[in-house]
Amino acid sequence: MNRIPLIFFAIFCTIIFNSCETLKQVAKDYDLDPTQTGQLTEREVIQGLKSALEVGTKAGVDQLAATNGYLRDEAVKILLPSELQSAIAQLKSTSAGRKVYDELIKDIEADMVVSLNRAAEKAVIKAKPIFVDAITSMTVQDGFDILKGDDNAATSYLRSKTFNQLVNAFKPDIKNVLDDPIVYNRSSEQLYSSFVKTYNEVEKNDIINALKLDPINEKDLATFVTERALDGMFQKVALKEKDIRENPSARINDILKKVFAQQ
């Protein structure tokens, strides 16, 4: 295991407790003893990790909150629910179905995808204060779990502690965007619900059954987009943290350069 999970543990212990005894012992055990010449001081470790967290979360969130932050990034772009994609693919598999798709569904599909990603871009900014609260409330046991865990243990901790809060914070904004009319005075939510209902009625038709279409289990679109938005956000934050650990050019200030040069 590299030294970064240890440094996370050290800073979180310091945040929780006024006493630095735990930090001193951990620092000594892992060659971060400030009494040794050339080693990092406790203050530098704390400043470095705070800076890394600030840079990582700000960069990830700000990138996605920008216009087209989700939409133009193929790694996190939110597409239609998989069941709906499968249904459309089945519809396009015949010449008659393809004609129906081209004339009636293609433009609506594109408008809906834009709407889903615009909703995520609007909501993602609300992650910042929730991340801060999760970090400052970390317990000693949480710290040990991170110390013993995988290289992504800190990100996994943040996800486990913040996911429900983030869903509650994101979903109202996402739902508002999905409720806005985007085509023919109908919203993404209305279009999705109408498509699911119509498709399932068609799927049950004896003639259409020859195509072996699968039914769609209707799912709340706002919940779907919220979950995908969070997946993309955590992915970006984790990538930024990894970049800071491995890439010297990503360490944009002196304290980051000093702390992470010794990992």
Image (cartoon, grey):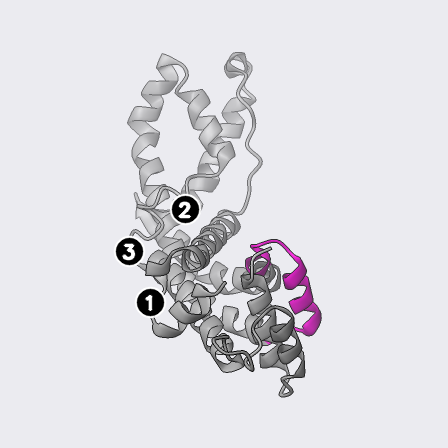
Q: Image height check: is 48 above or below 209? A: below
Any part of residue 185 in sight: no
- Residue 54 percent coordinates (x, y): 42, 70
Image side of residue 34 versus residue 70, left or right? right
- Residue 235 percent coordinates (x, y): 47, 51
- Mark 2 and mark 1 in contact? Answer it, CB < 8 Å: no
Instruction: Write the residue at 53% across / 21% down.
Output: 213
Instruction: Write the residue at 30% across / 46% down.
Output: 72
The quarter of the displayed image where residue 104 is located = top left
User: Magenta stretch?
Assistant: 137-156
Q: Is 207 or 219 nearer to us in this picture?
A: 219
- Residue 239 percent coordinates (x, y): 44, 53
User: Is the N terminus in the top left, top right, bottom left or bottom right quadrant?
Assistant: bottom right
Any part of residue 117 in sight: yes
Label number found at residue 252: 1
- Mark 3 and mark 1 in contact? Answer it, CB < 8 Å: no
